[in-house]
Image (cartoon, rainbow, N blue to C red):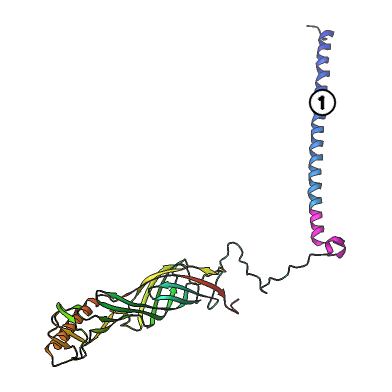
Amino acid sequence: MPWFTPLPEIEQKEGFIVRKPLVFTALCCTWAIVALSSASLSNAQFNSAAGSSAARDTAEFQPFSSSAFSASDAALPEPPDPSPAGREQPFTPPGMEEHYGFLSRMSIGSGISPFGILAQGTVILSEYADARVDSGWFFYNTGRIEVNGFNVVGDFHLASLGAKLDWYPTKSMWRISPGMLFYDGNRISGTLDVAGGTSVSINGTEYWSATANPATGATPLTGTVNLGLHSHTPAFTITGGFGKFVPHSHRHWSFPTEFGVAFAGPPTLDVKLAGWVCTSKTQKRCSDIADPTNPVGIQFQNNLDAALVKWRHNLDYVHVYPIISTSFMYSFDLPGSR
């Protein structure tokens, strides 16, 4: 083996040795360019964030100066004129509930029910309860009505005064209202004139009204009937319904309804008759019903008393007076409530 390397092999090996440093140098230059670009970009972002923080700190700690406002901003708009009522309507932000306390609002109104034409007033006691006063009146006279020989004049007299506590257990529109009826003058009365010769049945016995006769003093049968609807006074009442008599809001109008009963007791019945009656249509046996010595008069009074016992017994089953009403109310804030 020769002690030296032939020239061609040395040239090939030197070519390899020369090419390897050139590739390494190119890789180093590329890495340096990429590193310098990343550092420049990071520095720019840092300077931008630092500048924003400095500007924010400057804005926060810059002292107030009137020169910071332009001349156009110095002239602020005038406040709006107050409302014609002298007080603006309170504003309730969304999501908040408005509360109305003791004697903060009141309502007045009217309605119709079996007690007649109503006049009502309500005031707020708390968020759950209101106090109400009810009164009702109705007067009507039928005039003279002739039915089968009976001339009848009817008179409807309704008058009442009571108080209720309106309780809203869930603060909704539904309520329970216990109360008391302090005055109850409800009654139905009538007067009747029975024409002479007209038959009248009393306790299963038939009588005839006497024909007027000046010689004997006979007069046709007359009478009055009174049906009282107020045997218990004061009377307890219990009602329910929906709709508030005084809204717990700025709403003015409401239209509540109510249904229930008043424990007014059984109706009372009073019948008073006067005149002459006969036991036959020919009017041969006649008597004044107030004569305690005439058998006809005594018999008639006994039958009338027995009939009244039956009629009153039938009325004893009715102990309640119905309450069904609809009302319209106007509500307003009381002075000094807000």
Q: Examine the structure image and report whether residue 119 is included in the region drawn in magenta.
A: no
Look at the image and tell me whether residue 63 can be seen.
no
Prevailing secondary structure of the magenta residues? helix
Provide residue 61's location: percent of width, then percent of height.
81, 62
Identified by mark 1, the residue type is Ala
Label 1 residue SS: helix
* 51 relative to 154 in the view: left or right: right
Residue 149 drawn above or below residue 27: below
Residue 177 drawn above or below residue 48: below
Q: Quadrant of residue 232?
A: bottom left
Observer-nearest residue: 338 or 197?
197
List the single residue furthest toward the top. Answer: 1
* 262 relative to 280 in the view: left or right: right
Observer-nearest residue: 331 or 90?
331
Provide residue 121's location: percent of width, then percent of height.
49, 77
List the single residue furthest toward the bottom. Answer: 293
**Quarter of the image where the N terminus is located:** top right
Label 1 neighbour load within 10 Å: few <14, some 14-19, many 20+: few
- Which residue is the site of mark 1? 26
Residue drawn at (22%, 78%) of the image = 311
Provide residue 264's location: percent of width, then percent of height.
32, 79
Residue drawn at (73%, 69%) of the image = 81
Q: Quadrant of residue 22?
A: top right
**Quarter of the image where the C terminus is located:** bottom right
Q: Quadrant of residue 64?
A: bottom right
Look at the image and tell me whether residue 261 can be seen.
yes
Provide residue 87's location: percent of width, then percent of height.
66, 73
For the record, the magenta segment spans 53-74
